[in-house]
Image (cartoon, rainbow, N blue to C red):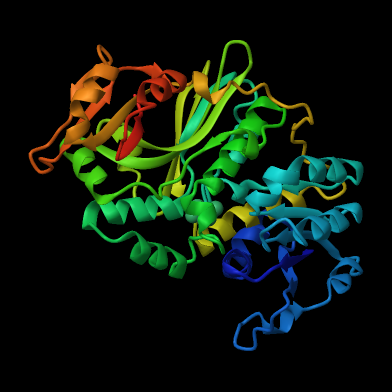
Protein backbone atom coordinates (compact mmCIF):
# COMPACT_ATOMS: atom_id res chain seq x y z
CA UNK A 1 0.00 0.00 0.00
CA UNK A 2 1.22 3.47 -0.89
CA UNK A 3 -0.04 6.48 1.04
CA UNK A 4 -0.97 9.52 -1.05
CA UNK A 5 -2.17 13.08 -0.61
CA UNK A 6 -4.16 15.52 -2.71
CA UNK A 7 -3.13 19.18 -2.69
CA UNK A 8 -6.24 21.22 -3.52
CA UNK A 9 -9.80 19.85 -3.45
CA UNK A 10 -11.12 21.74 -6.47
CA UNK A 11 -12.76 20.11 -9.49
CA UNK A 12 -9.75 17.97 -10.37
CA UNK A 13 -8.81 17.17 -6.75
CA UNK A 14 -12.36 15.89 -6.20
CA UNK A 15 -12.01 13.78 -9.33
CA UNK A 16 -8.78 12.26 -8.03
CA UNK A 17 -10.44 11.45 -4.68
CA UNK A 18 -13.40 9.84 -6.49
CA UNK A 19 -11.17 7.73 -8.73
CA UNK A 20 -8.93 6.63 -5.83
CA UNK A 21 -11.93 5.50 -3.81
CA UNK A 22 -14.34 4.45 -6.57
CA UNK A 23 -11.77 2.38 -8.46
CA UNK A 24 -9.89 1.08 -5.42
CA UNK A 25 -10.02 -2.53 -6.65
CA UNK A 26 -8.80 -1.67 -10.16
CA UNK A 27 -5.88 0.30 -8.71
CA UNK A 28 -4.99 -2.46 -6.24
CA UNK A 29 -4.68 -4.91 -9.13
CA UNK A 30 -1.76 -2.81 -10.35
CA UNK A 31 -0.26 -1.40 -7.13
CA UNK A 32 0.09 -4.07 -4.44
CA UNK A 33 -2.07 -2.94 -1.49
CA UNK A 34 -3.44 -0.04 -3.56
CA UNK A 35 -3.20 3.73 -3.19
CA UNK A 36 -4.50 5.02 0.11
CA UNK A 37 -5.78 8.58 0.27
CA UNK A 38 -4.08 9.82 3.42
CA UNK A 39 -4.56 13.57 3.29
CA UNK A 40 -6.26 16.37 1.44
CA UNK A 41 -4.62 19.75 1.79
CA UNK A 42 -6.91 22.74 1.35
CA UNK A 43 -7.49 26.07 3.07
CA UNK A 44 -11.20 25.23 3.23
CA UNK A 45 -13.08 22.66 5.30
CA UNK A 46 -15.48 20.28 3.59
CA UNK A 47 -17.78 19.14 6.42
CA UNK A 48 -20.31 17.54 4.01
CA UNK A 49 -17.74 15.77 1.88
CA UNK A 50 -17.14 12.00 2.21
CA UNK A 51 -13.46 12.99 2.46
CA UNK A 52 -13.94 15.47 5.34
CA UNK A 53 -11.79 13.43 7.74
CA UNK A 54 -8.81 13.59 5.36
CA UNK A 55 -8.64 17.37 5.21
CA UNK A 56 -5.66 19.13 6.72
CA UNK A 57 -4.60 22.77 6.54
CA UNK A 58 -1.01 22.00 7.42
CA UNK A 59 1.32 20.94 4.60
CA UNK A 60 4.04 19.97 7.08
CA UNK A 61 1.80 17.17 8.36
CA UNK A 62 1.92 15.59 4.89
CA UNK A 63 5.62 16.19 4.31
CA UNK A 64 6.51 14.78 7.72
CA UNK A 65 4.55 11.57 7.25
CA UNK A 66 7.20 9.09 6.02
CA UNK A 67 4.51 6.84 4.55
CA UNK A 68 3.46 9.44 1.97
CA UNK A 69 5.27 8.55 -1.26
CA UNK A 70 3.07 10.11 -3.95
CA UNK A 71 1.07 13.31 -3.96
CA UNK A 72 -1.02 15.03 -6.57
CA UNK A 73 -0.95 18.77 -7.01
CA UNK A 74 -4.36 19.91 -8.22
CA UNK A 75 -4.19 23.44 -6.85
CA UNK A 76 -3.56 25.19 -10.15
CA UNK A 77 -1.58 28.38 -10.67
CA UNK A 78 2.14 28.88 -10.18
CA UNK A 79 2.36 29.57 -6.44
CA UNK A 80 2.20 28.06 -3.96
CA UNK A 81 1.95 25.05 -6.32
CA UNK A 82 5.61 25.33 -7.37
CA UNK A 83 6.94 25.61 -3.82
CA UNK A 84 4.76 22.76 -2.57
CA UNK A 85 5.79 20.53 -5.49
CA UNK A 86 9.48 21.37 -5.06
CA UNK A 87 9.39 20.61 -1.34
CA UNK A 88 7.72 17.25 -1.91
CA UNK A 89 10.21 16.27 -4.64
CA UNK A 90 13.13 17.29 -2.44
CA UNK A 91 11.84 14.76 0.09
CA UNK A 92 11.73 12.07 -2.59
CA UNK A 93 7.92 12.21 -2.84
CA UNK A 94 6.68 11.93 -6.44
CA UNK A 95 4.31 14.63 -7.66
CA UNK A 96 1.57 14.12 -10.26
CA UNK A 97 -0.30 17.13 -11.59
CA UNK A 98 -2.94 18.53 -13.90
CA UNK A 99 -1.51 22.05 -13.52
CA UNK A 100 -0.57 23.07 -17.06
CA UNK A 101 0.24 26.62 -16.06
CA UNK A 102 2.95 25.39 -13.71
CA UNK A 103 4.14 22.59 -16.00
CA UNK A 104 4.56 25.01 -18.90
CA UNK A 105 6.35 27.63 -16.83
CA UNK A 106 8.47 25.51 -14.47
CA UNK A 107 7.93 21.85 -15.33
CA UNK A 108 11.49 21.48 -16.60
CA UNK A 109 12.93 22.67 -13.27
CA UNK A 110 10.67 20.32 -11.34
CA UNK A 111 11.74 17.40 -13.56
CA UNK A 112 15.34 18.20 -12.72
CA UNK A 113 14.59 18.32 -8.97
CA UNK A 114 12.75 14.99 -9.25
CA UNK A 115 15.79 13.45 -11.00
CA UNK A 116 18.12 14.69 -8.25
CA UNK A 117 15.92 13.10 -5.58
CA UNK A 118 15.08 9.77 -7.25
CA UNK A 119 11.39 10.43 -7.64
CA UNK A 120 9.11 11.51 -10.48
CA UNK A 121 7.26 14.58 -11.70
CA UNK A 122 4.40 13.50 -13.97
CA UNK A 123 1.80 15.62 -15.76
CA UNK A 124 -0.37 13.48 -18.04
CA UNK A 125 -3.51 15.39 -16.97
CA UNK A 126 -2.04 18.77 -17.90
CA UNK A 127 -2.84 18.26 -21.60
CA UNK A 128 -6.01 16.78 -23.05
CA UNK A 129 -7.85 16.13 -19.75
CA UNK A 130 -8.68 12.43 -19.61
CA UNK A 131 -6.98 11.52 -22.90
CA UNK A 132 -3.82 9.42 -22.53
CA UNK A 133 -1.53 11.57 -24.65
CA UNK A 134 1.75 12.33 -22.90
CA UNK A 135 2.41 8.72 -21.88
CA UNK A 136 1.91 7.42 -25.46
CA UNK A 137 4.03 10.28 -26.77
CA UNK A 138 6.87 9.45 -24.38
CA UNK A 139 6.57 5.67 -24.28
CA UNK A 140 5.22 4.55 -27.64
CA UNK A 141 6.53 7.21 -30.00
CA UNK A 142 10.14 7.62 -28.84
CA UNK A 143 11.35 6.02 -32.08
CA UNK A 144 9.41 8.46 -34.28
CA UNK A 145 10.41 11.76 -35.81
CA UNK A 146 7.25 13.71 -34.99
CA UNK A 147 6.71 16.36 -37.65
CA UNK A 148 3.47 17.82 -36.35
CA UNK A 149 1.12 17.76 -33.42
CA UNK A 150 -2.06 19.77 -33.53
CA UNK A 151 -5.67 19.81 -32.51
CA UNK A 152 -8.38 20.91 -30.12
CA UNK A 153 -6.79 21.17 -26.70
CA UNK A 154 -9.31 23.19 -24.71
CA UNK A 155 -12.63 21.69 -23.67
CA UNK A 156 -14.22 24.96 -22.59
CA UNK A 157 -13.79 26.77 -25.89
CA UNK A 158 -14.83 23.71 -27.87
CA UNK A 159 -17.97 23.51 -25.73
CA UNK A 160 -18.67 27.22 -26.31
CA UNK A 161 -18.04 27.05 -30.07
CA UNK A 162 -20.21 23.93 -30.41
CA UNK A 163 -23.17 25.49 -28.56
CA UNK A 164 -22.86 28.78 -30.46
CA UNK A 165 -22.74 26.89 -33.74
CA UNK A 166 -25.54 24.38 -33.13
CA UNK A 167 -27.94 26.39 -31.04
CA UNK A 168 -27.00 29.98 -31.84
CA UNK A 169 -26.40 30.35 -28.10
CA UNK A 170 -24.87 33.53 -26.69
CA UNK A 171 -21.25 33.51 -25.70
CA UNK A 172 -21.71 34.65 -22.06
CA UNK A 173 -24.50 32.15 -21.40
CA UNK A 174 -22.47 29.19 -22.70
CA UNK A 175 -19.35 30.26 -20.84
CA UNK A 176 -21.38 30.23 -17.62
CA UNK A 177 -22.56 26.69 -18.41
CA UNK A 178 -18.96 25.58 -18.99
CA UNK A 179 -17.98 27.08 -15.64
CA UNK A 180 -20.85 25.29 -13.89
CA UNK A 181 -19.77 22.01 -15.46
CA UNK A 182 -16.28 22.52 -14.02
CA UNK A 183 -14.58 22.80 -17.43
CA UNK A 184 -13.45 26.43 -17.34
CA UNK A 185 -10.37 27.81 -15.62
CA UNK A 186 -10.83 29.90 -12.46
CA UNK A 187 -10.17 32.86 -14.69
CA UNK A 188 -11.91 31.89 -17.95
CA UNK A 189 -9.81 34.42 -19.84
CA UNK A 190 -7.18 31.66 -19.94
CA UNK A 191 -9.61 29.51 -21.93
CA UNK A 192 -11.24 32.03 -24.26
CA UNK A 193 -8.12 34.06 -25.03
CA UNK A 194 -6.30 30.85 -26.00
CA UNK A 195 -3.73 30.91 -23.18
CA UNK A 196 -4.71 27.45 -21.95
CA UNK A 197 -4.38 25.93 -25.44
CA UNK A 198 -1.15 27.90 -25.90
CA UNK A 199 0.34 26.45 -22.72
CA UNK A 200 -0.69 22.93 -23.71
CA UNK A 201 0.77 23.14 -27.22
CA UNK A 202 3.95 24.62 -25.69
CA UNK A 203 4.21 21.63 -23.32
CA UNK A 204 3.69 19.17 -26.19
CA UNK A 205 6.23 21.01 -28.35
CA UNK A 206 8.78 20.84 -25.54
CA UNK A 207 8.22 17.10 -25.15
CA UNK A 208 8.41 16.48 -28.90
CA UNK A 209 11.60 18.51 -29.29
CA UNK A 210 13.19 17.57 -25.95
CA UNK A 211 14.00 21.29 -25.60
CA UNK A 212 12.02 24.23 -24.25
CA UNK A 213 9.17 26.06 -25.99
CA UNK A 214 7.73 28.89 -23.93
CA UNK A 215 4.10 29.78 -24.43
CA UNK A 216 4.90 33.50 -24.27
CA UNK A 217 7.13 33.15 -27.35
CA UNK A 218 4.32 31.69 -29.46
CA UNK A 219 1.50 33.41 -31.34
CA UNK A 220 -1.82 33.15 -29.48
CA UNK A 221 -5.28 34.24 -30.57
CA UNK A 222 -8.50 33.31 -28.74
CA UNK A 223 -12.17 33.00 -29.71
CA UNK A 224 -13.54 36.27 -28.31
CA UNK A 225 -13.81 37.92 -31.73
CA UNK A 226 -15.77 35.08 -33.32
CA UNK A 227 -19.35 36.23 -33.94
CA UNK A 228 -22.62 34.47 -34.88
CA UNK A 229 -22.35 35.47 -38.57
CA UNK A 230 -19.01 33.63 -38.83
CA UNK A 231 -20.79 30.36 -38.02
CA UNK A 232 -23.35 31.00 -40.77
CA UNK A 233 -20.64 31.53 -43.40
CA UNK A 234 -18.71 28.51 -42.11
CA UNK A 235 -21.73 26.23 -42.25
CA UNK A 236 -22.83 27.40 -45.72
CA UNK A 237 -19.37 26.53 -47.02
CA UNK A 238 -19.16 23.19 -45.12
CA UNK A 239 -16.75 24.21 -42.40
CA UNK A 240 -16.91 24.59 -38.62
CA UNK A 241 -14.85 26.82 -36.33
CA UNK A 242 -12.42 25.31 -33.84
CA UNK A 243 -9.70 26.73 -31.62
CA UNK A 244 -6.53 24.85 -32.56
CA UNK A 245 -3.08 24.53 -31.05
CA UNK A 246 -0.57 23.76 -33.81
CA UNK A 247 3.06 22.73 -33.61
CA UNK A 248 5.01 21.90 -36.78
CA UNK A 249 8.61 20.83 -36.96
CA UNK A 250 10.60 22.00 -39.97
CA UNK A 251 13.40 20.11 -41.75
CA UNK A 252 15.95 22.39 -40.05
CA UNK A 253 14.55 21.45 -36.58
CA UNK A 254 12.92 24.85 -36.05
CA UNK A 255 9.27 24.85 -34.96
CA UNK A 256 6.19 26.81 -35.88
CA UNK A 257 3.89 26.96 -32.83
CA UNK A 258 0.63 28.86 -32.61
CA UNK A 259 -2.88 28.93 -31.16
CA UNK A 260 -5.74 30.38 -33.19
CA UNK A 261 -9.33 29.76 -34.31
CA UNK A 262 -9.48 27.88 -37.61
CA UNK A 263 -12.14 26.95 -40.14
CA UNK A 264 -12.05 23.15 -40.24
CA UNK A 265 -13.48 21.46 -43.38
CA UNK A 266 -16.30 18.94 -43.06
CA UNK A 267 -14.17 15.99 -44.19
CA UNK A 268 -11.55 16.53 -41.51
CA UNK A 269 -11.80 14.28 -38.39
CA UNK A 270 -11.53 17.36 -36.11
CA UNK A 271 -14.82 18.62 -37.61
CA UNK A 272 -16.66 15.98 -35.59
CA UNK A 273 -14.92 16.78 -32.28
CA UNK A 274 -17.62 18.62 -30.35
CA UNK A 275 -18.60 19.81 -26.89
CA UNK A 276 -15.95 19.32 -24.21
CA UNK A 277 -14.10 16.72 -26.29
CA UNK A 278 -10.54 17.27 -27.45
CA UNK A 279 -8.96 15.77 -30.56
CA UNK A 280 -5.23 15.72 -31.15
CA UNK A 281 -3.35 14.66 -34.27
CA UNK A 282 0.24 13.49 -34.20
CA UNK A 283 2.19 12.77 -37.37
CA UNK A 284 5.24 10.55 -37.09
CA UNK A 285 7.54 9.74 -40.02
CA UNK A 286 7.09 5.97 -39.61
CA UNK A 287 3.74 5.51 -37.90
CA UNK A 288 2.05 8.20 -40.06
CA UNK A 289 -1.11 9.83 -38.62
CA UNK A 290 -2.45 9.18 -35.12
CA UNK A 291 -5.50 10.75 -33.55
CA UNK A 292 -6.29 10.94 -29.83
CA UNK A 293 -9.84 11.72 -28.77
CA UNK A 294 -11.65 12.07 -25.46
CA UNK A 295 -12.93 14.41 -22.78
CA UNK A 296 -10.52 17.30 -22.54
CA UNK A 297 -11.83 18.64 -19.23
CA UNK A 298 -14.05 17.62 -16.35
CA UNK A 299 -13.70 16.27 -12.85
CA UNK A 300 -13.60 12.51 -13.40
CA UNK A 301 -11.75 12.32 -16.75
CA UNK A 302 -9.01 14.65 -15.53
CA UNK A 303 -8.92 12.93 -12.13
CA UNK A 304 -8.52 9.61 -13.94
CA UNK A 305 -5.48 10.92 -15.85
CA UNK A 306 -3.88 12.13 -12.60
CA UNK A 307 -4.43 8.73 -10.97
CA UNK A 308 -2.85 7.00 -13.99
CA UNK A 309 0.32 8.94 -13.20
CA UNK A 310 0.01 8.21 -9.47
CA UNK A 311 -0.02 4.49 -10.27
CA UNK A 312 3.12 4.80 -12.40
CA UNK A 313 4.84 6.85 -9.68
CA UNK A 314 3.84 4.28 -7.03
CA UNK A 315 5.33 1.50 -9.15
CA UNK A 316 8.62 3.40 -9.43
CA UNK A 317 9.35 4.39 -5.81
CA UNK A 318 13.05 5.25 -5.40
CA UNK A 319 13.45 5.77 -9.16
CA UNK A 320 12.78 8.58 -11.61
CA UNK A 321 10.49 8.05 -14.58
CA UNK A 322 12.60 9.80 -17.24
CA UNK A 323 11.19 12.68 -19.28
CA UNK A 324 13.58 14.57 -21.53
CA UNK A 325 13.07 18.35 -21.44
CA UNK A 326 16.26 20.39 -21.83
CA UNK A 327 16.76 24.01 -20.89
CA UNK A 328 17.88 24.95 -24.41
CA UNK A 329 15.21 26.91 -26.27
CA UNK A 330 13.70 25.59 -29.50
CA UNK A 331 14.34 27.75 -32.53
CA UNK A 332 10.87 29.15 -33.29
CA UNK A 333 10.02 30.33 -36.80
CA UNK A 334 8.77 33.92 -36.88
CA UNK A 335 4.96 33.97 -37.01
CA UNK A 336 5.15 36.33 -40.00
CA UNK A 337 6.47 33.39 -42.10
CA UNK A 338 3.50 31.10 -41.40
CA UNK A 339 1.59 30.38 -44.62
CA UNK A 340 -2.21 30.12 -44.43
CA UNK A 341 -5.34 30.79 -46.38
CA UNK A 342 -7.73 33.26 -44.78
CA UNK A 343 -11.50 33.70 -44.67
CA UNK A 344 -12.33 37.40 -44.61
CA UNK A 345 -15.59 39.34 -44.09
CA UNK A 346 -15.84 43.02 -44.78
CA UNK A 347 -18.46 45.71 -45.46
CA UNK A 348 -19.74 45.73 -49.02
CA UNK A 349 -18.42 49.30 -49.29
CA UNK A 350 -14.86 47.87 -48.97
CA UNK A 351 -15.29 45.41 -51.83
CA UNK A 352 -13.54 47.45 -54.54
CA UNK A 353 -10.63 48.39 -52.29
CA UNK A 354 -10.25 44.75 -51.21
CA UNK A 355 -10.30 43.45 -54.78
CA UNK A 356 -7.67 45.98 -55.76
CA UNK A 357 -5.40 45.22 -52.80
CA UNK A 358 -5.78 41.42 -53.08
CA UNK A 359 -5.61 41.40 -56.90
CA UNK A 360 -4.94 37.81 -58.03
CA UNK A 361 -4.90 36.56 -54.42
CA UNK A 362 -8.63 35.93 -53.95
CA UNK A 363 -9.33 32.22 -54.30
CA UNK A 364 -13.10 32.21 -53.78
CA UNK A 365 -16.03 34.58 -53.27
CA UNK A 366 -17.84 33.54 -50.09
CA UNK A 367 -20.49 36.29 -50.03
CA UNK A 368 -23.96 35.12 -48.97
CA UNK A 369 -27.43 36.47 -49.85
CA UNK A 370 -28.19 36.41 -46.10
CA UNK A 371 -25.65 39.22 -45.65
CA UNK A 372 -26.31 41.64 -48.54
CA UNK A 373 -24.23 44.40 -46.91
CA UNK A 374 -21.10 42.29 -46.74
CA UNK A 375 -18.36 41.02 -49.03
CA UNK A 376 -16.69 37.77 -47.97
CA UNK A 377 -13.85 35.87 -49.61
CA UNK A 378 -11.19 33.25 -49.20
CA UNK A 379 -7.59 34.11 -50.03
CA UNK A 380 -5.07 31.83 -51.67
CA UNK A 381 -2.16 30.62 -49.53
CA UNK A 382 -0.02 33.51 -48.30
CA UNK A 383 2.27 34.32 -45.42
CA UNK A 384 1.07 36.23 -42.36
CA UNK A 385 3.40 39.06 -43.39
CA UNK A 386 1.95 39.23 -46.91
CA UNK A 387 -1.63 39.16 -45.59
CA UNK A 388 -0.88 41.91 -43.07
CA UNK A 389 0.72 44.07 -45.78
CA UNK A 390 -2.23 43.66 -48.18
CA UNK A 391 -4.76 44.24 -45.41
CA UNK A 392 -2.99 47.25 -43.96
CA UNK A 393 -5.40 49.95 -45.12
CA UNK A 394 -8.56 47.80 -45.13
CA UNK A 395 -11.16 47.24 -42.44
CA UNK A 396 -12.17 43.62 -41.90
CA UNK A 397 -15.04 42.35 -39.75
CA UNK A 398 -13.50 38.89 -39.48
CA UNK A 399 -10.29 37.18 -40.44
CA UNK A 400 -10.04 33.45 -39.67
CA UNK A 401 -7.38 31.03 -40.91
CA UNK A 402 -8.48 27.91 -42.78
CA UNK A 403 -7.18 24.42 -42.00
CA UNK A 404 -6.14 22.75 -45.25
N1 LIG B 1 -10.08 24.73 -18.82
C1 LIG B 1 -9.46 23.58 -19.36
C2 LIG B 1 -10.24 23.17 -20.59
C3 LIG B 1 -9.46 22.47 -18.36
O1 LIG B 1 -11.36 23.64 -20.76
O2 LIG B 1 -9.72 22.43 -21.42
C4 LIG B 1 -8.69 21.25 -18.77
O3 LIG B 1 -7.34 21.54 -19.00
Q: Quadrant of the C terminus?
A: top left
**Does residue 227 appear left or right of residue 64 in this picture?**
left
**Residue 167 on image: x %, y %:** 22, 58
The image quarter in which residue 202 lies? top right
Residue 203 visible within the image: yes
**Residue 246 on image: x %, y %:** 49, 31
Q: Above or below — where is 47 with respect to 261? A: below
**Residue 276 on image: x %, y %:** 41, 54
Point out the residue furthest to the bottom here. 47
Point out the residue furthest to the left here. 369
> Residue, x 61% and y 39% (percent of image)?
134
**Does residue 163 appear left or right of residue 22 in this picture?**
left
Q: Quadrant of the N terminus?
A: bottom right
**Does residue 361 appear left or right of residue 97 in this picture?**
left
> Residue, x 25% and y 25% (percent of image)?
378
> Residue, x 31% and y 31% (percent of image)?
268
Amino acid sequence: MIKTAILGLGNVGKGVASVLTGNRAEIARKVPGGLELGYILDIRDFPDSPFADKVTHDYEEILNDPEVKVICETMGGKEPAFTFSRRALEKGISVCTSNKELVEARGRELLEIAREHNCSYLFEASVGGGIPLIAPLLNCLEQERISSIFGILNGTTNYILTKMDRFGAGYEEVLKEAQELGYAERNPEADVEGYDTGRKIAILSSLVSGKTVRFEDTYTEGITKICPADFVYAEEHHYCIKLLGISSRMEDESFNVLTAPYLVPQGHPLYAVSDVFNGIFIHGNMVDDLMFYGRGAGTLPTGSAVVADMIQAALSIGKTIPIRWDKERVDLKPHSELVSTFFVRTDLSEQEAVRKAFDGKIADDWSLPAFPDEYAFLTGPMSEAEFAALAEKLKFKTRIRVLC
